[in-house]
Image: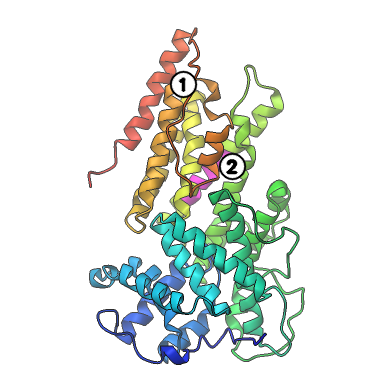
Amino acid sequence: MPRQSVATLAVRPDDTTAPADPLSLPLSSRFEVVELYLKYIHDKPHTLFHSPTVRSAVQDESISLVLLFGMLALGARFSTDDAIKARMEDFAAESRRRLKENIEHASIETVQACILNAEVFNGNANREGECLYLGIAIRMSQYLRLDLPVDGESDVDRECRLRVFWTCKIVDIWGGAGFGVPLQIHPDKSPRLPMAEEDFESLSTGQISCLELNQRLGIWASETLVLETAKELDYFASTLPAHLQLTDQNLQLYAHRSTGQTFVAMHLAFFHYSTLLYFHYLDRPRPPPALDEVFAARCKNYATAFSELIQTSMELPGCEAVYAIVGHLTCVSSSVLIHTLLFGEEHQIIQARHRLEINFNKILLLSKLWPGMESVKARLYLFQDACLQSIEPDTHKIDQWMTRFLLNYALPLEQREDGSRPDRADKKASHLIFERSRFTHDVFASEPAS
């Protein structure tokens, strides 16, 4: 099978003409919007390109237009130019048009274009389109054997192929849960992890040095390990190298290196999966076993840590977390905070309410960038209503409805049906919980009118 150079991002013969009006942008604007894509999206939900090569290809106008329009569609929403922002759907439509024309052409470029367009669909809550394009990307990456090295390829090409494969593996895991479909990539199929971001960025196009398997691992490699070792997250945290641990010093350091968003994304993923790991301990009998109390506390601590990092990401320049899936992660964190509001100790209530406000404000911020956040807000409202309808300690029990809420973000969520409403013998406790439930109403009622 012929191998295509990953680094060049070259224009195909049918892509030699500049985009026609009204889609065309001055070169300076194209470069600016692609930079926004690289800053806010790339290396967060996916890692597909060698950034210096992308910048060079945009500058000399050699970049494939299907990829360029995909990057423009994702980056334009962050532009301060309203005229550019208003055209992001046009950019997305043009990328899809060009992709469909060559969808039968198996290449790494087609895989990259599918993932870019799937991210657009994700942000717009177009679940059919997202599932379709992710499925094509994953299957094509397998067909192209992107996990295997190719003799004579450059270091940049080899690392790009590896990063695209790992992206496909991660979106396979995310999509498998989100859409409730089987995994396509076998869990044991795990080639070398991606190298450190700084090392990758410093590679020169065309350089061939036969990268060793013991390359220094970076942030994205650690994020893949979070998903690979979901049942050993405590071990992962205890063995994380000092330079990758979540500290104020490291946050400042990575923000200065322009990899702060990627660093934050890794730790948000860790806190999210740790929250899921211990979530079922929130559904506890009375009185709960001592160990269950410990694990329930861990769940709440991780959900709180997630919210604290969300707040930090909004306050510290260079650490923004504004890709679409953050909305779902924030929704899950909020569900744990609601448990604390309803059933926690008095001294925990003020902090839980504050964190819930932070989370909800984050979802509102994301809704200005991604139309799909309306479905996230709707899921959170449904969760709140489900809790208030029963107001019993089993509000967070793991059943089919809760599983869909926590994992199947891409599937519709209906009103929770609870056939048996328990008799509240403890009228005093019920009144206290009812009073606390007003806190969540107050938080959600703070949403400004559209």
User: At 29% from the left edge and 85% from the top edge, which residue is drawn?
Assistant: 20
Q: List the residue tagged with mark 2.
A: 275
Cα separation between marks 1 and 2: 23 Å
Quarter of the rendering containing residue 23: bottom left
In the image, taking residue 318 as reference, residue 248 lies left or right, namely: right
Is residue 4 visible in the rendered image? The answer is yes
- Dot 1 corresponds to which residue? 390
Q: How is the image coloured?
A: rainbow
Which kind of residue does numbered mark 1 sit on?
Ser
Query: Picture quarter containing residue 191?
Result: bottom right
> Which quarter of the figure is the N terminus placed in?
bottom right
- Amino acid on which disc 2 is placed: Thr
Residue sitting at x 46%, y 30%: 416
The residue located at (49%, 23%) in the rendering is 418
Q: Which residues are magenta?
A: 301-310
Looking at the image, residue 391 sits to the left or right of residue 245; the answer is: left
Residue 308 colored in magenta in the image: yes
Q: Is residue 258 part of the magenta span, yes or no?
A: no
Is the residue 327 above or below the residue 262 in the image? above
x and y, in percent, of residue 132 in the image: 50, 62
Q: Position of residue 228 (x, y in %)?
A: 69, 56
| Residue 246 visible somewhere in the drawing | no
**Which residue: 54% across, 56% down?**
248
Q: Please name whichever residue, 171 or 249, is drawn nearer the observer in this view of the structure.
A: 171
Per the image, label 2 sits on a secondary structure element best described as helix
Q: Kindly report which numbered mark, 1 or 2, lies closer to the viewer in this rendering.
A: 1
Say if mark 1 contacts mark 2, CB within 8 Å. no
Percent of width and height locating residue 9? 51, 85
| Secondary structure of residue under mark 1 | helix
Which percent across, then down, holds residue 67? Answer: 45, 78
